[in-house]
Amino acid sequence: MVTIPAIPLRYLILEFCVGTIRDYIRKKYTGPMPSEIEGMIQMASGLQYIHSQNFVHRDIKPENVLISSSHVLKISDFGICRPVTTSSQSFSLSSVPTGTRMFNSPELLQSEDKSPEEKQQIKAYVSTDIFSLGCLFFSYITMGGHPFAKEKIIIEFVTVANIFKGKKYLGKDGYELGLSKDHYAFSMIDGMTEVNPTSRWTLDRVLKTLENQKLKLAQDEDDKH
């Protein structure tokens, strides 16, 4: 008789979450939420922490931001996350997959038709996540828009083509889901979604902008009383 050794079981205990940002945008989740500003601060702070641990997420999108039972927004799904070089915060594009195309940065999209050998030589940076976060912020504020899609019903191949060309539709020029140019997030999202990765806003700058706007709103509220 052969005795088979017992295999120890491992249990993962995860925090219960009540929805995602995608659920919120589609009005499938209508429960309590942080303020718009606070929500973006939480998302940017979460991504900044990931980068501080020398990882790039590579799949930032509305589905991957969870709403906890305490109404805190938390980045999830690290299935294609990978480490980056500590000094340069870079990584090679040799590994696949690379996330969701409509939220991918131009540099990730441009690498799709490269050979494995070519990808090995190409370096991308954590700023690819900042591009994705900028797209997410726009969708979050406008409740479903996309900075590279003009129509309310978003068509993936058209949106991806616009990302390639750097053709944005942030403003309200004939676009129902656009932002006014004096909106506090207009310049920020424009900077986060720069086609050139070296020209994108840093997360420090994003957080400073959001914190300043939060302070301004608090001051305006105080002035009313």
Image: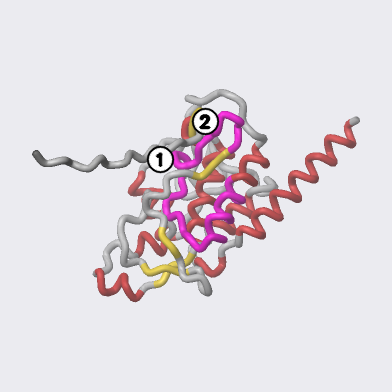
Q: Residue furthest front?
A: 1
Residue 126, relative to residue 139: is it above or below? Answer: below
Residue type pointed to by label 2: Tyr
Residue 94 coordinates in the image, percent (x, y) = 31, 67
Q: Residue 122 in the image: state x and y as whole percent.
A: 37, 73
Magenta residues span 43-72
Residue 29 magenta: no
Looking at the image, which is closer to me, 164 or 47?
47
Left or right: 21 as drawn, with respect to 1: right
Near mark 1 (Cα within 10 A), the count class, few <14, some 14-19 or many ≥20, is some
Residue farthest toward the left in the current orientation of the protein: 1
The reply to whether callout 1 and callout 2 are in contact (CB within 8 Å) is no
Please give left or right for residue 60 compared with residue 44 in the image.
left
Q: Earlier in the sequence, mark 1 or mark 2?
A: 2
Colouring used for the render: secondary structure
Residue drawn where x is 50% and y is 30% of the image: 16
Q: Residue at x 61, y 31 (%)?
A: 70
Front-most of residues 180 and 7: 7
For mark 2, what is the residue? 24
Measure the C-alpha gap from mark 1 to mark 2: 17 Å
Disc 2, SS: helix
Q: Which residue is mark 1?
A: 154
The residue at 83%/35% (across/down) is 221
Amino acid under label 1? Ile
SS for callout 1: loop
Relative placement, left or right, of 115 versus 51 is left
Above or below residue 39? Residue 212 is below
Quadrant into which the C terminus falls: top right
Residue 67 figure quarter: top right
User: Is 68 placed above or below 122 here?
Assistant: above
Identify whether 93 is placed above or below 37.
below
Q: Nearer the viewer, mark 1 or mark 2?
A: 2
